[in-house]
Image (cartoon, grey):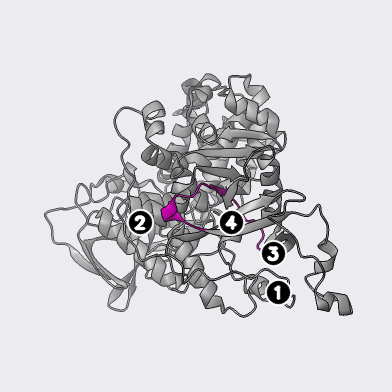
Amino acid sequence: MTDIASSSTTLEEARPECPYLYQYDSLEDKPSRTIRLLTVGYDGDNEAQEPSKPCDKYRDSDTCKHACGDTLNPKKLKVSLHEACLDDNPEYEAVSYAWGSAELVRKVACDSKWLWVTQSCYDLLVRLKRYSRGTRAARCYWIDAICINQGFQEQDTPEQRSRRERSHQVAMMATIYEKAVQVTVWPGHVEDGVRLGILLDSGLRIDVEECIPFLRPLIQQPYFTRIWPLQEIALAQRCIILIGQHTIVDIRSVFLMPHSHWWVRHNHPDNVELTSIRLEYRRVTTLHRRLLELFQSSLNNSNAGPGPSIPPSISEVLLHARSHQASEPRDKVFALYGILQRLEVYLEPPNYLRSVEDIYLEVSTAAICMDRSFRVFEGLTGCFTYDLPSWSPDWSDHDHITKVAEWNDYKASGSSEAQFSVHGRQLLAHGLRIDVVCQEHVTLATTSFLIEADTLAKSLAEPLRNLSNVMKGQYLDLLGKLFLDIWGDLQTRYTRDYAHRTWVQNDAEKTTDKNAVCRLIGYRSQTDTAKGVIKHCTILHAGACRKLDRKKLFQTRDGRLGIASEAVKSGDSIVLLQGCNLPMVVRPEGTKWKLIAPAYLPADGIMDGKLWRSDGPLGCFSFV
């Protein structure tokens, strides 16, 4: 699947004046599981002909904006569409790729008419034509950009009709990919795809230095940042990926590779490039692999650990998928519709006429109620594009603020279970107010990655000068604990001895604020920062910047230090909610409250539940 384009400008520009532009027949009066299938015609194929002449407007004035006359060329791409019902079990391949730009810039001949497509769709058709060459029978494909009426080609059809069709077809999307004999993935053009294909087929049993140049171009393809492929790949009976001009590889070799023994065998501390690629692979493949383990029994038998795979929670799926992109905000939920159905979460069918707010509120409510958990609060940042209640994350934001703490690592409310009720946009919960924010400081002055070590050290040292009554030891302890997950991640790559040498030493000379921070982020002396980022610490610095991006350091009335989203303000309260693993920043809203974001406060054992009182009276919070 791709991203359903939603640009009204593109739609308007595509409204035809040319009678030879392809017009879709409505599927509304057809059996409910009717779809369109596509064949890519060869040169001279009688089943996929192009128009035989320009339209009258072109002939009369040479101004047809569809330039239909200039494509009367036997070498142009030709396709043909026909209808089929899924109940009849037609044989077809479903194609998964990324749309890229929604601008319609190329056209193909479709059943004696012209069909406008995006550049990436055109490139895909060229690749499929090459892939199909030599087969005895014409291959049938399902390509959403063409097989679903997006409303781009219509002259008289209201946009609402095409949206109804899109909604109905998207509701069947999981079934379409599930019933396909094969899902064909085209990630886009990959440099030296032949060599990469050999590496993937061999299980990367080749010298590590030889592999690196070929791995990065694949994993950096925009395709792997999109949300639709999560469902398309996980539910496929069989899934291949087209790499380069001629290479075909099982998609599982891509997603299993970064978790294989190959990474362990080549765990060289000095190879920063390999470490960087490994992190990119982990970011891209984590949710893909989890879903493959859940839905693909063959994967479970051969590659998973002992016992059946435990299904992820709804909150886990939503939070992991949040960083994946979609040009249509509704698709951040609709692209997961089939997966959620198979996890026994039954939402309203996709409907592009519904508001984004209604869709996001519905899925957030389902996550809280079905999981019996507040884990979705982990995704709150206090920043919203849409008019949502404060307790529902804005799922549209793929560049969201990073988490201050991992949900499963802490138990701020002890072993208590979530007790709540949801009434429309209002959520009732119980908890304890433990402190109030009295002072705040922007931890990093910029949202960009600070990979220059000296700049990073100065930025981290600044709060020690700007916040009153902050003890240096308490601040360094906060940062040290905050960075533990980054260091723990590094220790799986670098030897423990190296991590120990570069970590904060008990006998370190801490004569200045900057010197102290330099020690914390991995330098044995302040003079090391003059060299910039030494290669061994590159990953630590990048991780620290991600951790602190758009965050505020704050001090509470009782002298505690914490860190939270940049949305935190003086006067906000720190609350421990029953059943919530992380402390939450909340703000009064008249007689009710707004949830702002999770907070990290290591003092007094707060993160481990030392301040939680299960036998004491709890306050009632009405969040709106």
- Rounded to the nearest angstrom, the CA distance separating label 3 from label 4 is 49 Å
First along the sequence among labels 1 and 3: 1
Residue type at tag 2: Val
Select label 3 or label 2 by which is in front: 3
Q: Secondary structure at mark 3?
A: strand
Q: Which residue is painted at 35% across and 54% down in the image?
A: 341
Say what amino acid the circle numbered 3 marks: Leu
Mark 4 vs mark 2, foreground winner is 2
Asked if 6 appears above or below 442 in the picture, the reply is below
What amino acid is found at the position of numbered circle 1 in the picture?
A: Glu
Neighbours of disc 4 within 10 Å: few (<14), some (14-19), many (20+): some
- The mark nearer the N terminus, 3 or 4, is 3
Quote the CA–CA distance across marks 1 and 3: 14 Å
- Can you tell which of label 1 and label 4 is closer to the viewer? 1
User: According to the image, label 4 marks what residue?
Assistant: 445
Q: In the drawing, does residue 250 fall left or right of residue 338?
A: right
* Amino acid type, mark 4: Ala
- The span shown in magenta is 84-104
Name the spot of residue 71 as percent of width and height, x first: 82, 62
The numbered mark at residue 13 is 1
**Cα gap from disc 1 to disc 4, whole angstroms:** 42 Å
Q: CA distance from mark 3 to mark 2?
A: 43 Å
Nearest the camera: 212 or 556? 212
- Who's the residue at 82% across and 70% down the image? 54
Any part of residue 446 in sight: yes
Q: Give whichever of 216, 299 is nearer the camera.
A: 299
Q: Is residue 412 shown left or right of residue 114?
A: left
In the picture of the structure, the residue carrying the numbered disc 2 is: 376
